[in-house]
Image: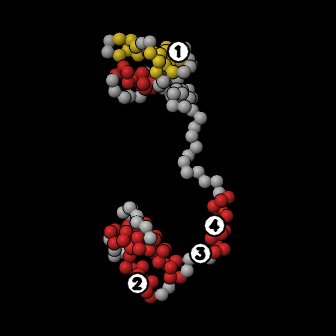
């Protein structure tokens, strides 16, 4: 590494974001909107070294291109097969089987919710989750399992 390159790299650590962006535009020929000093310093240091000592050989570039073409890249995680309208009843032993009536005394009334295969029935309406039923009753979000006193084994506690 030459003395000039070492001085240039040392100077990068003293520059502010605006100066780093300006230097980035000079070296890369395009502007950047990032304000991350660390990232800017690393990119600038790489570019300065590549310009001073030489970039990748043509053979290395070709090999990198081959590897990139063979790679199966995912830019986002795979989507699940379940649709948002599908009730989330796969909770193991937390719920009793479909057809069971859950009873809960609340504010002087005994509330009854029927467990269905595809949700829960309460006062003639279908709900996807037990928490949605509890929210309809109380007006605020709360755990449906806790509100209806369902233990982890599905038995009322």
User: Is the residue 11 above or below the residue 110 in the image?
Assistant: below
Residue pushed farthest bottom? 3
Closer-to-camera residue (115/94): 115
Q: Quadrant of the C terminus?
A: top left
* CA distance for labels 4 and 3: 10 Å
Secondary structure at badge 2 equals helix
* CA distance for labels 2 and 4: 31 Å
Q: Are marks 2 and 4 in contact (CB under 8 Å)?
A: no
* CA distance for labels 2 and 3: 23 Å
User: According to the image, label 1 marks what residue?
Assistant: 100
Q: Are marks 2 and 3 in contact (CB under 8 Å)?
A: no
User: Is the residue 98 above or below the residue 2 in the image?
Assistant: above
Q: Quadrant of residue 17?
A: bottom left
Q: Are marks 3 and 1 in contact (CB under 8 Å)?
A: no
Residue 56 coordinates in the image, percent (x, y) = 59, 75
Secondary structure at badge 3 equals loop
Instruction: Please tell me which of labels 4 and 1 falls first in the chain.
Output: 4
Residue 4 coordinates in the image, percent (x, y) = 43, 86
The crowd level at tag 1 (other Cα within 10 Å; few <14, some 14-19, many 20+) is: few
User: According to the image, label 3 marks what residue?
Assistant: 56
Secondary structure at badge 1 equals loop
Instruction: Please tell me which of labels 2 and 4 falls first in the chain.
Output: 2
Residue pushed farthest front? 29
In this rendering, which labeled residue sits more in front, label 2 or label 4?
4
Question: Can you tell which mark lies on residue 64?
Answer: 4
Query: Residue 22 vs residue 42: left or right?
Result: left
Q: Are marks 4 and 3 in contact (CB under 8 Å)?
A: yes
Would residue 78 be seen by someone viewing this image from the given angle? yes
């Amino acid at each position: 590494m030459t003395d000039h390159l070492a001085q240039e790299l040392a100077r990068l650590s003293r520059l502010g974001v605006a100066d780093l962006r300006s230097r980035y535009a000079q070296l890369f020929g395009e502007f950047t909107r990032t304000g991350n000093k660390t990232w800017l310093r690393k990119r600038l240091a790489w570019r300065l070294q590549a310009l001073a000592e030489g970039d990748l050989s043509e053979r290395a570039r070709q090999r990198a291109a081959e590897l990139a073409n063979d790679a199966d890249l995912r830019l986002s995680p795979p989507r699940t097969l379940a649709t948002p309208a599908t009730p989330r009843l796969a909770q193991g032993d937390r719920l009793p089987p479909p057809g069971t009536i859950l009873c809960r005394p609340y504010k002087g009334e005994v509330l009854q919710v029927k467990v269905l295969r595809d949700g829960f029935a309460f006062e003639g309406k279908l709900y996807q989750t037990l928490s949605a039923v509890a929210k309809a009753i109380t007006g605020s979000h709360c755990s449906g399992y806790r509100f209806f006193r369902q233990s982890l084994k599905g038995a009322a506690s």
